[in-house]
Image (cartoon, helix red, strand yellow):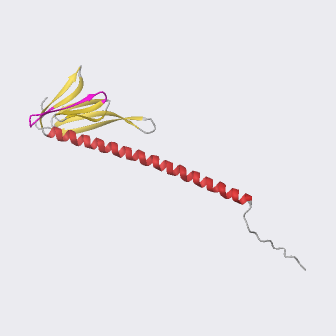
């Protein structure tokens, strides 16, 4: 009688299982790294979009205030611009100035902190007013980037 020399294989060997586990570990490491990178990129982009929306809202607020002003006075201290006073057509007054590193708006409704700035300058132009804000943007990585924001607005007969 002859013995059947065919062996049937019912399981994986230990080496095959270790190789498969190592490959799965590498795939998981790569995918986790990519997901974390995408999440960081997404949060950075969301922060930048929020910052840009804040700047647009500030520009619109400044322009709407200047449009309803009858005249403007730029306040200075030791040849340095410290603020802007707008006399409104309705008789009120709005003041923009830097206070403790923040760009502030003061009106009858109270003080409003608009954004953090390093420096501000106002200019009376023939066609209206211009404000320049020097800001420091702080990134998540701890780096800071300086940027200058400029807004122009038409004034009803701009006079200093």
| Magenta stretch secondary structure, dominant | strand
- Quadrant of the rendered structure where residue 11 is? bottom right
Q: Position of residue 16 (x, y in %)?
A: 71, 60
Residue drawn at (22%, 21%), measured in percent from left and top?
Answer: 77
* Residue furthest left as drawn: 90
Q: Is residue 41 above or below residue 131?
A: below
Residue drawn at (30%, 42%), measured in percent from left and top?
Answer: 54
Question: Relative to residue 7, is residue 121 drawn left or right?
Answer: left
Residue drawn at (14%, 37%), measured in percent from left and top?
Answer: 155
Q: Position of residue 95 (x, y in %)?
A: 19, 31
Q: Position of residue 89 (x, y in %)?
A: 9, 37
Question: Relative to residue 83, is residue 16 drawn left or right?
Answer: right
Closer to us: 137 or 114? 114
Q: Is residue 88 magenta?
A: yes
* Residue furthest right as drawn: 1
Q: Is residue 121 magenta?
A: no
Placement of the N terminus among the 4 image quadrants = bottom right
Q: Position of residue 158 (x, y in %)?
A: 13, 34
Question: Relative to residue 19, is residue 54 drawn left or right?
Answer: left
Closer to us: 10 or 39? 10
- Quadrant of the rendered structure where residue 115 is? top left
* Residue furthest bottom as drawn: 1
Which span of residues is magenta-colored? 86-101
Closer to us: 107 or 147? 107
Question: Relative to residue 52, is residue 34 drawn left or right?
Answer: right
- Quadrant of the rendered structure where residue 160 is? top left
Q: How many marks?
A: 0
Residue drawn at (29%, 41%), measured in percent from left and top?
Answer: 55
């Amino acid at each position: 009688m002859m013995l059947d020399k065919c062996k049937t294989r019912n399981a994986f060997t230990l080496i095959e299982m270790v190789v498969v586990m190592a490959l799965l570990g590498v795939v998981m490491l790569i995918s986790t790294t990519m997901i974390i990178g995408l999440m960081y990129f997404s949060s950075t982009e969301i922060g930048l979009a929020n910052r840009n929306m804040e700047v647009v809202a500030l520009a619109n607020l400044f322009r709407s205030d200047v449009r309803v002003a009858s005249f403007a006075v730029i306040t200075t201290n030791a040849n340095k611009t410290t603020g802007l006073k707008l006399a409104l057509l309705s008789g009120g007054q709005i003041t923009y100035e830097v206070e403790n590193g923040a760009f502030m708006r003061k009106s009858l409704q109270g003080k409003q902190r608009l954004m953090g700035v390093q420096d501000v300058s106002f200019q009376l132009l023939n066609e209206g007013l211009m404000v320049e804000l020097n800001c420091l943007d702080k990134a998540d990585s701890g780096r800071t980037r300086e940027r200058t924001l400029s807004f122009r607005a038409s004034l009803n007969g701009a006079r200093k």
